[in-house]
Image (tube, rainbow, N blue to C red):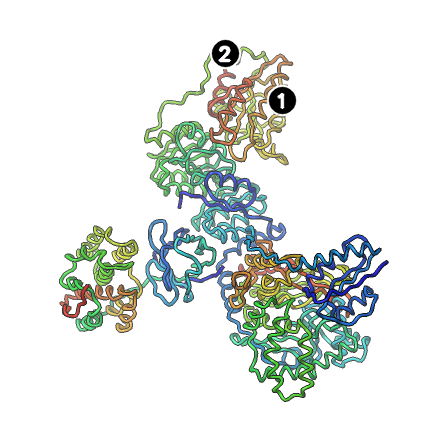
Amino acid sequence: MKFFQKILPNIYRDSVALMQISCKLCDLPGISQASAIMATEANIELLNEAGLLVEKMSPQPNNLLVAIQGDDEAIIDVAFKQVEKSINEVGTPTLSGEEQILAPQSIEMALDEFPEAQLALISCPGEYAEAEAQKALNLGLDVMIFSDNVSIEGELALKKYAANSGHLVMGPDCGTAILNGVPLGFSNVVRSGNIGIVAASGTGLQQISCLVDQLGGGVSQAIGTGGRDLHAKIGGLSMLKGIQVLAKNDEIKIITLVSKPPSPAVADKVLNEARKCGKPVVVSFLGADLAAIKGDNLFPVETLEQAAHAAFLLSQGKKPSDDPLPRHTIETSIIEEITSSFSDKQRYVRGLYSGGTFSYEAMLLLGAEIGPMNSASPLSTKHKLNDIWSSTGNTIIDLGDDLFTRGRPHPMIDCRLRNDRILQEAKDPETAIILLDVVIGHGSHHDPAGEIVASIQAARASAQKLGNSLAFVTFVCGTINDPQNLVAQENKLRDVGAIVLGSNAQAVHLASDVIKAIGDS
Amino acid sequence: MSDTLNVINIGLSSFADAVAGAGGTAVNVNWRPPADGNVTIGKALSSLVHNQSVDQANQIAFDKYLNAQPVLEGIGRAGDVLPNMGERCILHSGPPIDWQNVCGPVHGAIIGAILYEGWASDKNSAENLLKSGEVTIDPCHHHAAVGPMAGITSPSMPVWMVTNAIGGNKTFTNLNEGLGKVLRFGANSFDVLERLKWMQTILAPVLNEALARSGGVELKPLMAKALYMGDEIHNRNAAATGLLLKQLVPHALRSGLPNDDIADAIEFIAGNDHFFLNVSMAACKAMLDVAHGVPHSSMVTAMARNGVEFGIRVSGGGDTWFTAPAPVVDGLYFPGYSITDAAPDLGDSAITETAGIGGFAMAASPAIVQFVGGTPSDAIARSKEMVPITLGRNNALTIPALNFSGTAAGIDVRKVVDTGILPLINTGIAHKDAGVGQIGAGITRAPLACFTQALEYLQENLNA
Amino acid sequence: MYSLVAISVGTKIPSSNFDGKIIGIYDHTFNVELADLSILTCASSNYFNMPHGILVNSQIRDLKAYFKTGTTVHHRNGILRFSSKKLKIDLRSASMWAPKFKLESRPQKTQLNILLSEIKNDLPLGCEKLLAGPLSVVSQMIGWGRGLTPEGDDIIAGYLSAISLTAPDDPLRQQIASEIRRNIYKTTTVSNQMLNDAIEGLFIEPVEDLRSALYGNGDIGYASRKLKLVGSSSGIAMMFGLIAGAAYIENYTLKLNSNFIKAA
């Protein structure tokens, strides 16, 4: 063990700076103790006690004392050189004029930094979402809660507070919205325009806005309410507010409402609000009795596709046509071709959906035409699948349902769950048609069609082994301006022989016609 | 302005990108679950953010703090001037604690104070006085007083007396003994007690006489000047000590006291760059005490540590201390010492941060900033970091490096919990054993648990 | 961030969220134009209330240190924030300033004459026509003069403060209102708002106070001194309008000796 001590005359450095230098020295290999310190009486005593000073010395407070204890002289020499270097560095000015801006760490802090904010978009884990939403409302912001797992009591408390303070709560579990032409959450790049939507259904909102875009119209405001908003417990508070917001918005000329049928009391409230909003309102309460929706400015429709057409015509100053829309665009000869390729056992449609509202609409439309659909969440409990992981008869499932996604990513983001199911259905000799929705836009998988075509091909191969030929009936919900591009996605599907239709209703109608044709043959 | 959409985004940051891509504007919150993910406290917090009662109460409390004018008025005998102290009580720093549980330095200092008072002649009998309950201990803060490190103040000790000229409230603090073997680090040897006796009999009269002749020293202007001279007035008091000495010397010389006494006193003060620390603390307490007791106010009025627990008091929190285990400071250690030798955080001196100086005014003190292993720009960043958790700025205490803006002051319990930004404290580190003294210094943070408890208290009282 | 607390707000300040931008900064006040083009005036406590006004709890000085013209202003649930991020104004505890007027007495002709004599040397040439009868001159007066609120508009606002004591369907009151609406394009935005408020019966606090003093209880001398101090010439012009209006509804004929009128 070697000791080294040296006075550096007339060098003053702040004690803290010196402590840092000392610490760095101690970190050097082979150095057991080291100190660079002003040689005051107290400090000399300190080093004496530490056993670092071998030579007695008198206090010299204006001089710097370096004392090092190390394995050998070479190591000590390295250490001392470092002291000299560090001491010179300490004097170098490092003050930079750069502003260091602290990223906001709370909503309030963000609002102080960004006082023009109007909306808080909340997608934190559900257990914290209610508190974050409440803070945003307190601070005077509208709120979109993308998160799910907020209790219904929490939802009601937030929506009541919002109703009293004149704010809008979208969600919880509001996956998509468009405000002032800006898409939020999972959303499509839709042309701006004079149509406004208030939807309790995320995919319903996406289907209508995308179809309006394809027809040449535009949607500047699409307000999501969250799926539970029209439950009796919540009473449609967000839908009522949404209608009021759109009624006041001068740019919006047409309002479209989308939901499953609410309870009669909630429906009354919502339709009353719609009747007095002063603008034409297209009402798409999927499965509701259209005759019961009465009002001079109300235009009830059966399907999402009809809603888009009605809203588009109204937005052009035209009356919605009373003529029904074409069921689909596929010629009868092709249907015959498909049915003739089926084996005797192939009789059923298997709808494997990623969008909840699409699956619901499919069950309604197919149920009315070819009989009740079996499902994990059927229209009537009588038709509940015993095992949701295995289809029987005509089956429609929503793979985005919590029942399927528990612990897994949503099928719009991760295609594996559905791809596996496609292969599984292909092995079932009774499967005739596989019905698929493909939802694109911000937030969705960057190439869902690309993922699906691989499994379509694998499914065909697997079916062929059974001597079967499968029909894939699909549609893409999106626009040509979406990152994935509607046309590109459709082409990928067509390239592997899938039939691509313009909407869910068309796809379902085609499936229905094919199933009926099987029965007729 | 319906043609734009301005969004605050909490959660998936890709949503903000989509908004920006579509012509809107979005600001991402660097979000973490508040209160370390405690949903109940998170919910309590959500009812307090933008709460009008709390905001109004804070405005009142903060105005009182801002308007305070602490004046250093004189020196008194602790037992005579401290409210409700009594003659057999020893005061310590931090929140209340049983004498059996105190940390090493505090224990050593209590024994030292008993010996200093002459209540016992040796350590064993001193110990027995504590055991018998004949001598009790109590927090300084419960007697309008503060003390650095162990904070030990016994009845015969001289104390500085500070009065808030606006609120009329008075605060007290003991006199700084210097570095090395000192009572506040638990040393209680003969020379330590001798020094205390000298302070009582020689130093205190000189200071008292000088102060009386000066008519009192206004402390805020002095502290403001010290901030311009590189002090943050917690861990660096070199400038403030000099400024105080400059004001007192002529009055001391004219006092008629023996020249040797005056010379000794001046020499003592000049040799201790921390001499002003205690005065700074009493000044800060005077500014904060007057802001205490506004119902529903979430403004922190004291942060203090007893070497075992860290405690805070809140203006609307009544007499309650909200406590959590005191952290051990990961700072810079003197040669031969490391974190394993350190006592947990200790002392009332965090009253300075509570009042917006110390760690909150780091930008004023580039020399101190190297505790953070940093540069002057880090110091500025640290001071700015405190802005979002405070109620406003103290424009009487400004910092040149921050464009002469006031220090961030008035810690808001709600903002601490909501942002997760914990108040910074510059602190010295005591050896865990009595009497060894200071073994390092560094920067620590007030524990979150103190603030979450205070938040729950405020929320329950608001609904009561 | 510096925080101010508002002590009172006028009835025309929206309680819901709004956005605007600063269009003028003066010694103790600043003006904010909102999206609907209304103008909000925020003033320090030594100023006075007005229908579109916010009074704050301190004497704000050096306003230019906090923001500049063009700085945007955002109201979110009771707090005004500024894009300059240096100031917040909390409106939540502010009381609503809404003067309660009660007719208790009527001014005597001599009282009006005394008031008139106090200001006659400072009146612009031509305003004496108002004393003869209002309708012929309203259209000429709108936008006449200089400043944020041209003197002609101030005179009409003052005049309406007296006339609005009549029943809402009083024909003269209605005619003046329609005359104003027809000519309002001639004047500034600030004046536009003042005249529209005047049609609704809303006036700045010093006008309210003098009107109350004349028709109820109150110190006429004190109220008139305060009114005269408003703006560089606005207060005097409003006071003249009020005197002329009061003379009209009380059926007094007041005369302004034109020798005293300064050249315009």
At 76% from the left edge and 65% from the top edge, which residue is drawn? A7
Q: Which chain is disc 1 placed on?
A: A
Could you tell me residue A372's position as x and y percent? 52, 24
Q: Quadrant of residue A74?
A: bottom right
| Depth check, front residue: B261 or C9 | B261
Q: Is residue B165 left or right of residue C119?
A: right
Judging by the rendered image, the residue that carries numbered circle 2 is A336
The secondary element bearing badge 1 is classed as helix
Q: Is residue B123 left or right of residue A399?
A: right
Could you tell me residue A65's position as x and y percent? 75, 65
**Would you place residue C248 above or below residue A217 in this image?**
below
Q: Is residue B133 left or right of residue A381?
A: right
Query: Considering the image in quadrants, where does the C terminus of chain B appear?
Result: bottom right
Judging by the rendered image, the residue that carries numbered circle 1 is A423
Q: Pointers 2 and 1 in contact (CB under 8 A)?
A: no
Amino acid of disc 2: Glu
**Would you place residue B339 above or below residue B19 in this image?**
below
Q: Which residue ends up furthest to the bottom in the rendered image?
A: B256
**Discs 2, 1: same chain:** yes
Could you tell me residue C122's position as x and y percent? 22, 68
At 79% from the left edge and 63% from the top edge, which residue is drawn? A5
